[in-house]
Amino acid sequence: MFDVPMQEKLRQPFAPEQIKTRTEKRKRGDGTTFELALSYVSHATITARLNDVFGHHWSNAILHQEVTGKEAIVLFSLTAQDVTHQQFGSARIQNEEGVGDALKAAASDGLRKCASLFGIGLGLWDPDEVAGTEPSENGMADDTTAAQTPDLCTGPQRQALEKIVARCRERGQVKAVQALSAALTEAMNGTLTKARASDLITEYGSSPK
């Protein structure tokens, strides 16, 4: 594990000029959509923080990448001081020529998610916290809309699905990988329900399919 000074460096808040904002479409309980503003830091900013804390004693890798429909998905791995975290990253494909850009964006998404498990950028947006929550006219979250939204897949459930799909991929279980990858895309988009995630974990996590 990392010592306290190192943990403090990893969790140090970013300067305002390093934080970027983008909008993301989310679904209400009635199926209509709205846009939510999300804050994040760039791939280069995270890399700089990793270099500052670990020097050159860290590494990353893309373990798998695939394109499903209009979505690019990668399984990203980040290792520092013998600690490894793996997360799926995703990005929407804008057009046929944009597959490469989408895979690159998905890798950046995976890096951000892995880095957050090391403590980097914890003060920024959390998809599990904002999924299904609509801003009201005063800019605050609308509790009424959130209450009407079905219970969504939790962070631990998503991590369990990621581990299961990695295991199924190693075993060559194509149908299981397809089903789980589709579910993870739903989870990333904030549309996978907690009940559905639980069913998938039970179905594919208990025995080979």
Image (cartoon, rainbow, N blue to C red):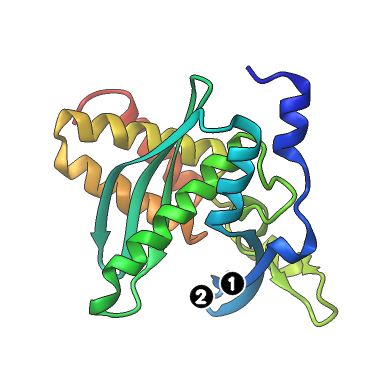
Disc 1 residue type? Arg
Residue 192 visible somewhere in the drawing: no
Front residue (pair 170, 42):
42
Left or right: 49 as drawn, with respect to 102: right
- Residue drawn at (34%, 55%), measured in percent from left and top? 73
Q: Does the image show residue 86?
A: yes
Residue found at the far right of this picture? 138
Q: Relative to 150, does residue 86 appear above or below in the rendering? A: above
Q: Amino acid at mark 2?
A: Gly
Instruction: Kindly indicate the quadrant of the structure image that contains residue 33.
Output: bottom right
Judge by depth and name the residue closer to the eye, 21 or 26. 21
Q: Which residue is mark 2?
A: 31
Q: Marks 1 and 2: in contact by CB < 8 Å?
A: yes
Look at 78% across and 77% down and name the residue there. Answer: 136
Cα–Cα gap, marks 2 and 1:
5 Å
The mark found on residue 28 in the picture is 1
- Residue at 51 percent of width and 75 percent of height: 31
Please, what secondary structure does the residue beneath circle 2 have? loop
